């Protein structure tokens, strides 16, 4: 145990790893601060680079970059009323109202300090919950895994959309994409139409780059909104008054962090949904709800901690079960497989040093966020002036090369382009993208456990609920399916 | 481009039917009830059910004349020439890259790729080509030299470094 911790420290404090973390921090801060570039996109862009690194630096790059990006997304929200990443959208109006009142430093300071606290809270939950869940998961057979994946996918549909029907369509399309190729229990080439490149399935990384980066660039190209102005206010000391806020709003910080971690851990929903929910709860529970929307810091404190805690929360199901908690960990799971760190309970028993290293990375990332974030706020006006007309094309060429680099084939560039177009069109039509991503990532796992269970039980569906844990998980899955329907029916009966 | 839900439903029904027909050709595994056709087949059935529900919803929303009252509705940007051109170029340069990178090589293709995008996004004319070349060389250096990705040289093979 202690030698594993020692190994973890050695890996994390390795000079190469430290340099990677610093570089990833700057990258993450920049990507977050530029509107139209998201934390998920930062992850997708990092994958081709991490491809050439050892496992721990690769994970370090992603953990640091995403934590920084979720914080720095607050900056343009506050100064330009344009969230840098969707995770800041919930309180953009509030922060902008504060900036106009000349309180930009309080809004940004609260974003920074409580992001770090939320991130550390989420990490603490990850450290406590993941190993015990892993121990529990060691007893799981294909039946339990089948239900677990199905429940995760169901959650993704209901959590990410107010239109579950479109969410289901998106999910089913994602699952069908996962069917392409040889990777099925029978090893039969499905939907390949004779193409050798399709045999290996549709490449996950080019697809993710397309869905998260190319679609954003298309959206930028057809954006008809006029350029936004930066609030021209001097930004003072961002740390001033933070201790007072901590003492004033301890419940809000705790509630935001706890809800954020939980939402993050639920498959499909990530930092953005955590922030929206937290902001709404904060307003509902507040002693002064009338002040919300007029430049009041309370909601920023709560939802600012929520979005960063969600990042860590999302890693819990990703590491323990291989079920991503958000779209960032969906990409991370692909990276873990490439690095031979296959997620699952055995990761905790066979190679604990790697898991401990992940914990340490999260702690360090959230601590160095404070000085680096402070510096980023200082130079934020310069970052916001970087011409996007140059930036966007360069990022797109980077995406092309990155997609190519995974297998050195132009086929993957085509996959990237098609995925980008599809993501743009379906999102434009109100189909959420997150369920599709989860479908692609989990399709293989769902089918494998389904088919294995069917073979074991000789086609008897009752066997799926024969074991107590499997029956419980199955019951929960059905509850998630039918609860919203039931609630609506009850509400209608009650005449509300 | 926004399609009415019913149009999506019709497209998806067609798609799921195509899958169901296609999976009939998958082999069965002797002595087993489940084969490679089962899982995609179930997904296609699910998709068809969703598609029918979408059609019902779409027709209803059209009758109410609310959101998406038209079968097909073009986005606002399609009426602006500048944005139409930007969209075509964003997609076009990627096709250009996929089709020609092996012949022309990365440096030429990349420079043209960036230059076209810069022009359409309104970068100052004088800096377009130098900027495109410098950034392409930068990306080339990062991936070719540092990460050892075999980016093609194409017609520039003779001066490969």
Image: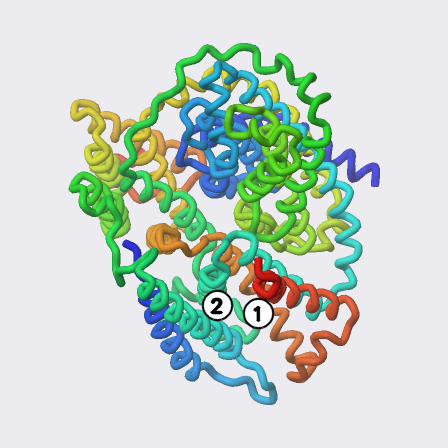
Q: Is residue B59 left or right of residue A10?
A: left
The spot of residue A266 in percent (x, y) is 63, 51
Q: In this rendering, does residue A245 appear at all?
A: yes
Question: How many numbered circles does the render carry?
Answer: 2
Colour mapping used in the image: rainbow
Q: Quadrant of the N terminus of chain B?
A: bottom left
Classify mark 2: helix, strand or loop. helix
Q: Residue furthest right?
A: A2
Looking at the picture, do discs 1 and 2 lie on one chain?
yes
Q: Quadrant of the C terminus of chain B?
A: top left
Residue at image mark 2: A179
Q: In this rendering, does residue A200 appear at all?
A: no
Q: Residue furthest front?
A: A495
Residue at image mark 1: A447
**Measured along the vertical axis of the image, is residue B107 above or below residue A442?**
above
The spot of residue A156 in percent (x, y) is 56, 56
Classify mark 1: helix, strand or loop. helix
**Measured along the vertical axis of the image, is residue A399 above or below residue A461?**
above
Viewer-nearest residue: B137 or A79: A79
The spot of residue A459 in percent (x, y) is 64, 83
Q: Evaluate if marks 1 and 2 touch, with contact meaning CB atoms under 8 Å apart.
A: yes
User: Which chain letter goes with mark 2?
Assistant: A
Viewer-nearest residue: A77 or A65: A77
**Measured along the vertical axis of the image, is residue A362 above or below residue B92?**
above
Q: Residue at 59% x, 42% y: name it.
A: A277
User: Gap between marks 1 and 2, in whole Å?
Assistant: 9 Å
Specify the quadrant of the image occupied by residue A273: top right
Q: Residue at 37% x, 74% y: name it.
A: B13
User: Which chain letter goes with mark 1?
Assistant: A
Label 1 vs 2, first from the N-terminus: 2
């Amino acid at each position: 145990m202690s030698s594993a911790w020692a190994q973890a420290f050695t890996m994390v404090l390795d000079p190469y790893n430290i340099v990677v973390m610093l570089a990833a921090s700057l990258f993450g801060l920049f990507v977050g601060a530029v509107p139209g570039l998201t934390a998920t996109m930062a992850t997708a862009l990092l994958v081709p680079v991490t491809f050439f690194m050892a496992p721990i630096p690769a994970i370090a790059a992603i953990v640091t970059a995403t934590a920084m990006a979720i914080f720095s997304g607050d900056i343009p929200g506050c100064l330009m009323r344009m969230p840098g990443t969707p995770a800041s959208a919930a309180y953009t109006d509030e922060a902008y109202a504060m900036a106009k009142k000349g309180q930009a430093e309080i809004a940004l300071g609260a974003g920074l300090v409580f992001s770090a606290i939320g991130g550390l809270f989420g990490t603490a939950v990850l450290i406590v919950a993941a190993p015990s869940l892993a121990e529990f998961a060691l007893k799981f057979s294909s039946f339990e895994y089948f239900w677990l994946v199905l429940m995760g996918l169901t959650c993704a549909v209901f959590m990410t959309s107010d239109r579950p029907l479109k969410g289901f369509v998106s999910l089913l399309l994602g699952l069908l994409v996962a069917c392409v190729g040889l990777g099925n229990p029978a090893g039969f080439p499905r939907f390949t139409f004779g193409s050798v490149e399709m045999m290996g399935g549709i490449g996950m990384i080019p697809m993710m780059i397309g869905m998260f980066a190319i679609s954003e660039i298309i959206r930028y190209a057809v954006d008809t909104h006029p350029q936004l102005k930066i609030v021209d206010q001097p930004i003072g000391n961002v740390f001033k008054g933070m201790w007072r806020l901590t003492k004033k709003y301890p419940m809000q910080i705790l509630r935001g962090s706890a809800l954020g971690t939980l939402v993050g851990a639920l498959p499909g929903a990530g930092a953005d949904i955590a922030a929206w929910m937290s902001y709404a709860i904060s307003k509902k529970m507040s002693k002064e709800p009338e002040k919300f929307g007029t430049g009041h810091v309370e909601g920023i404190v709560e939802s600012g901690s929520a979005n960063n805690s969600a990042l860590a929360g999302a890693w819990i199901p990703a590491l323990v079960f291989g079920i991503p908690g958000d779209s960032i960990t969906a990409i991370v799971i692909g990276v873990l497989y490439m690095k031979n760190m296959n997620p699952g309970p055995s990761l905790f028993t066979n190679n604990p040093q790697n898991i401990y290293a992940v914990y340490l990375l999260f702690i360090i990332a959230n601590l160095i966020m404070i000085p680096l974030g402070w510096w980023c706020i200082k130079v934020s006006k310069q970052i916001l002036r970087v011409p996007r007309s140059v930036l966007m094309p360069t990022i797109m060429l980077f995406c092309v090369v990155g997609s190519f680099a995974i297998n050195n084939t132009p086929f993957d560039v085509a996959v990237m382009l098609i995925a980008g177009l599809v993501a743009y069109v379906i999102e434009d039509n109100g189909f959420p993208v997150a369920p599709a991503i989860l479908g692609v990532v989990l399709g293989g796992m769902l089918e494998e456990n389904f088919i294995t269970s069917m073979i074991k039980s000789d086609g008897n569906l009752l066997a799926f609920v024969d074991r107590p844990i499997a029956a419980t998980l199955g019951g929960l899955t059905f509850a998630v399916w039918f609860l919203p329907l039931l609630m609506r029916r009850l509400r209608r009966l009650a005449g509300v | 481009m926004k399609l009415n839900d019913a149009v999506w439903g019709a497209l998806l029904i067609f798609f799921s039917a195509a899958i169901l027909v296609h999976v009939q050709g998958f082999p069965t595994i002797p002595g087993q009830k489940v084969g490679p056709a089962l899982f995609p087949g179930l997904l296609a059935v699910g998709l068809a059910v969703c598609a029918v529900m979408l059609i019902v919803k779409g027709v209803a929303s059209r009758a109410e004349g609310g959101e998406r009252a038209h079968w097909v509705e073009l986005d606002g940007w399609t009426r602006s020439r500048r944005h139409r051109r930007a969209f075509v170029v964003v997609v076009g340069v990627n096709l250009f890259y996929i089709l020609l990178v092996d012949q022309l090589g990365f440096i030429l293709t990349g420079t043209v790729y960036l230059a076209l995008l810069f022009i359409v996004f309104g970068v100052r004319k004088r800096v377009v080509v130098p900027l495109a070349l410098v950034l392409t060389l930068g990306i080339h250096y990062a991936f070719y030299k540092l990460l050892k990705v075999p980016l093609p040289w194409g017609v520039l093979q003779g001066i490969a470094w």
